Image (spheres, grey):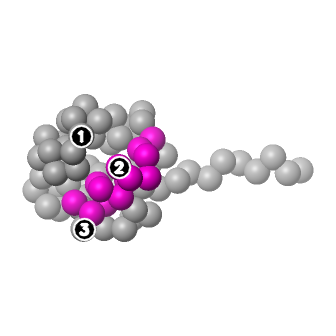
Amino acid sequence: MKTRIKELRARYDLTQEELAKKAGVRRETILFLEKGKYNPSLKLAHDIAKVLKSKIEEVFILEEEPSSEG
């Protein structure tokens, strides 16, 4: 899963620490999300999107897996 967290944080001049505090998580969670190493729960995705004044689908981009149909 790709995210636009870093880009949106920059828009609102937020550090990872500030976003984490507002979303109720640790800074490392934001770091892992930005690097694509962690998939958030729906609640966390909602909370982050709310802080970033965006829709969930604008923050988190679900990558399509190749179809197994032949």
| Dot 2 or dot 3, earlier in sequence | 2
Considering every residue shown, the one lying at the far right of the view is 70
Is 1 contained in the magenta span?
no
Q: Residue at x 24, y 61 (%)?
A: 52
- Which residue lies at the image location 42% right of the left edge and 36% below the top edge? 38
| Amino acid of disc 2 | Leu
Instruction: Tell me where the magenta segment starts and ends, as one range.
Output: 39-51
Q: Are marks 1 and 2 in contact (CB under 8 Å)?
A: yes
Residue 53, label in figure: 3
Place of residue 21 in the rendered image (x, y in percent of width and height, measured from the top left): 15, 45
Q: Which residue is mark 1?
A: 25
Mark 3 vs mark 1: which is more N-terminal?
1
The residue where tag 2 is placed is: 44
- Amino acid type at circle 3 is Lys
Query: Counting other residues with Cα less than 10 Å from the Cα at mark 1, is it few (<14), some (14-19), or many (20 or more)?
Result: some
- Element type where label 1 sits in the image: loop
Position of residue 45 measured from the top left corner of the image (x, y, whole percent): 37, 53
Instruction: Quote the CA–CA distance across marks 2 and 3.
Output: 14 Å
Answer left or right for 13 relative to 24: left
Q: Main secondary structure of the magenta part?
A: helix
How far is mark 1 from mark 2, CA to CA? 9 Å
Q: Nearer the viewer, residue 17 or 44?
A: 44
